[in-house]
């Protein structure tokens, strides 16, 4: 008979600890999503191998422990038989290293009760400070018992468990390294696809992934190749459509140019009157729109080449303000230059004036005066005192033929588009924003000489 009594303990989790698990789980979820695909695959493989290693280790540990326990019980039982024979012949318990005794003081109570019931049984205690195995049987009204120490067996099990832990850790580490190596190619291909998609979104329409297709490739067999092919096909289709749209815009604007020139000449020959002024105004607006469309088409086609030179920025802006004061579209709008800094910048004077003219024209048309220009270092700030830029324009950037909020007036929406496009050509940068006390703010950053 074998006696073994497992011990259990009930652990209650405090309520505060349970309440704190929510934010902790959320933080772990954010950290998991922040990991790259390669590390996720490596972690999953390592976790799976760890679970398998723990399961196999537990099975091996239990099997080895059962083997050791069975051997210890058999040895104790055999020793008990020998001690009983000696006791029946001599009436005395042999005094040797078997630790045999009659009614021993340290005899476990379950083993004593079983022996008094007439049963020969063993009791194994591997968790005590001194691991041992007991064997007992009744002798008249007394209990004859032997005790064998199991210190060597316990040390052997501890060493065996350490070997299992080391072996499992090595297997998990190798699985993680193997998973990272296998996932590195997949991660690299996906990063290449993402980088190509970003380049396409930034206007580089001829960007392609160019994933090498495996021999005998068929759709559905290689997901990465499918993704690369789909992105390349999308980019090629998008490029063809955008190029067709750009050609159409340029062709329409070019074809309109000739009849508009004749219409403008004819409008100038009309006798002075109110209808003549209206006709000339609309013809001028249509002509300006046509020129803007042609400029947008050239910017889209990357056909603009700047004539860069070193200029004092303050002088360039002063000349632009003087010409703006004489221009009919800015007359009476309150364009003023608040400060001047003669910083040398490397830029194209004609294109810079085009940028500032469009920004000032946008402020005069959609904002309220006065329109202030400030030259500070290599930056030029254009500010009005109107309702400011709408939120979606600041978030998404200027859109063609969209002027934003209704309170900012009507227009083609090409002025800001041209300004930002020309800024890219000359190596400048335009930042759009709203002032804290109201009004739209456009800041042009120029490269210093």
Image: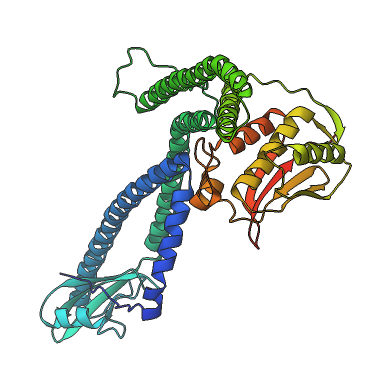
Residue 139 appears in view: no
Residue drawn where x is 50% and y is 36% of the image:
401
- Image position of 264 (left or right of 119): right
* Image quarter hosting the C terminus: top right
| Coloration mode | rainbow
- Image position of 113 (left or right of 266): left
In the displayed structure, would residue 69 be above or below residue 373? below
Residue drawn where x is 39% and y is 42% of the image:
45
Q: Position of residue 131 (x, y in %)?
A: 36, 70
Q: Position of residue 393 (x, y in %)?
A: 53, 46
Quick one: 356 or 180, which is closer to the camera? 356
- Image position of 329 (left or right of 278): right
Quick one: 258 or 344, which is closer to the camera? 258
Find residue 44 and report its image quarter.
top left
* Image quarter hosting the N terminus: bottom left
Residue 89 appears in view: yes
Find residue 95 and report its image quarter.
bottom left
- Image position of 217 (left or right of 302): left
Quick one: 86 or 38, which is closer to the camera? 38
Q: Residue furthest left?
A: 118
Q: Position of residue 175 (x, y in %)?
A: 42, 40
Callout count: 0
Q: Position of residue 174 (x, y in %)?
A: 45, 39
Residue drawn where x is 56% and y is 48% of the image:
394
């Amino acid at each position: 008979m074998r006696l073994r009594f497992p011990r259990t303990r009930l652990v209650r989790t405090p309520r505060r600890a349970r309440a704190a698990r929510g934010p902790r789980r959320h933080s772990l979820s954010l950290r998991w999503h922040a990991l790259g695909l390669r590390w996720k695959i490596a972690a999953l493989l390592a976790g799976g191998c760890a679970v398998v290693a723990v399961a196999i280790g537990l099975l091996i540990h239990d099997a080895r422990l059962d083997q050791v326990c069975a051997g210890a019980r058999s040895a104790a039982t055999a020793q008990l038989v020998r001690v009983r024979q000696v006791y029946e012949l001599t009436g005395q318990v042999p005094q040797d290293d078997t630790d045999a005794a009659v009614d021993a003081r340290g005899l476990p109570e379950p083993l004593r009760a079983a022996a008094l019931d007439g049963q020969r049984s063993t009791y194994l205690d591997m968790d005590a400070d001194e691991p041992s195995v007991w064997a007992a049987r009744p002798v008249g009204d007394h209990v004859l018992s032997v005790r064998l120490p199991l210190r060597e067996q316990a040390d052997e099990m501890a060493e065996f468990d350490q070997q299992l832990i080391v072996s499992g850790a090595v297997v998990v580490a190798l699985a993680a390294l193997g998973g990272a190596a296998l996932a590195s190619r997949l991660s690299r291909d996906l990063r290449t696809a993402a980088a190509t998609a970003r380049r396409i979104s930034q206007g580089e329409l001829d960007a392609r992934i160019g994933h090498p297709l495996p021999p005998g490739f068929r759709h559905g067999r290689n997901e990465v190749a499918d993704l690369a092919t789909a992105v390349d096909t999308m980019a090629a289709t998008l490029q063809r459509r955008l190029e067709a749209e750009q050609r159409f815009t340029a062709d329409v604007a070019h074809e309109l140019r000739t009849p508009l020139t004749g219409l403008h000449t004819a409008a100038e020959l009309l006798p002075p009157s109110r209808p003549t002024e209206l006709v000339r105004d609309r013809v001028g607006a249509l002509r300006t729109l046509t020129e803007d469309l042609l400029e947008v088409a050239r910017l889209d086609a990357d056909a603009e080449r700047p004539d860069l030179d070193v200029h004092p920025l303050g002088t360039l802006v002063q000349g632009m303000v003087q010409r703006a004061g004489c221009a009919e579209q800015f007359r009476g709008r309150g364009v003023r230059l608040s400060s001047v800094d003669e910083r040398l910048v490397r830029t194209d004077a004609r294109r810079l004036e085009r940028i500032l003219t469009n920004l000032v024209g946008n402020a005069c048309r959609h904002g309220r005066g006065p329109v202030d220009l400030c030259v500070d270092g290599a930056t030029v700030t254009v500010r009005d005192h109107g309702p400011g830029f709408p939120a979606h324009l600041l978030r998404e950037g200027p859109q063609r033929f969209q002027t934003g909020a209704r309170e900012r007036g009507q227009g083609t929406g090409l002025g800001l588009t041209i300004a930002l496009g020309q800024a890219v050509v000359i190596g400048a940068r335009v930042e759009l924003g709203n002032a804290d006390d109201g009004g739209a703010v456009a800041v042009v950053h120029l490269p210093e000489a």
